Image (spheres, helix red, strand yellow):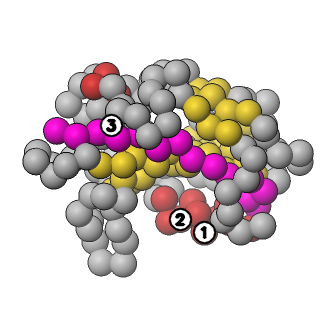
Amino acid sequence: MGFALSELVLKSPAFEADGKIPLKHAGEGENTSPSLEWTNVPPGTHSFALICHDPDAPLVSPGTYGFVHWVLYNIPESVTSLPEGTQEYTKGSNDGNKQGYMGPLPPNGHGAHHYFFWLFALDKEINLESGLTLWQLLERIEPHVIGMNRLVGTYER
């Protein structure tokens, strides 16, 4: 399939699509991941992967763009939501050189940044090791993506 939007729907009770992400979920707040819910899962889904990326952030290194805030994977097919502050499933590495969720924290005066929460439905359980970067994860899951969609939130300091 490659990376193309599907009928999969990703929502959060914490913020509306294109709405402001609450301070609680930001790096200057409690730095707690928002709860997420999804529906319209493609038939044949056996696992999920999730990322949060800020393409508005200044470059972090040559060959990349933006800032990766969250990489989470090995989410079973039976799961259709993540609770706020989840510590479940396999954590990848964010661009803060840590594993787990890292809330929005754009530079002061940089304007509103857009935070893309991407959910990928996969056609198999891949059982990947912890600590993968966004790019390592995408390389490993790309042949298995059968559905994907995103929820975008904004944050400004």
Q: Is residue 150 magenta?
A: yes
Q: Which residue is mark 1?
A: 139
Q: Nearer the viewer, residue 107 or 132?
A: 107
CA distance for labels 2 and 3: 21 Å
Q: Which mark is residue 85?
A: none
CA distance for labels 1 and 2: 5 Å
Which numbered disc, 2 or 3, marks the residue that appears first in the sequence?
Answer: 3
Quadrant where the image shows the N terminus: bottom right
Identity, as a three-letter code, of the amino acid under mark 2: Gln
**Rendered residue at 25%/46% (across/down):** 112
Left or right of 6? Residue 68 is left
Q: Kindly indicate whether the residue at mark 2 contacts the one at mark 1 (C-beta within 8 angstroms).
A: yes
Q: Position of residue 17 (x, y in %)?
A: 49, 37
Q: Position of residue 148 (x, y in %)?
A: 67, 52
Nearer the observer, disc 2 or disc 3?
3
Identity, as a three-letter code, of the amino acid under mark 3: Gly
Nearer the observer, disc 1 or disc 3?
3
Q: Which residues are magenta?
A: 144-157
Q: Which residue is mark 3?
A: 103
**Rendered residue at 67%/33% (across/down):** 38
43 above or below 132?
A: above
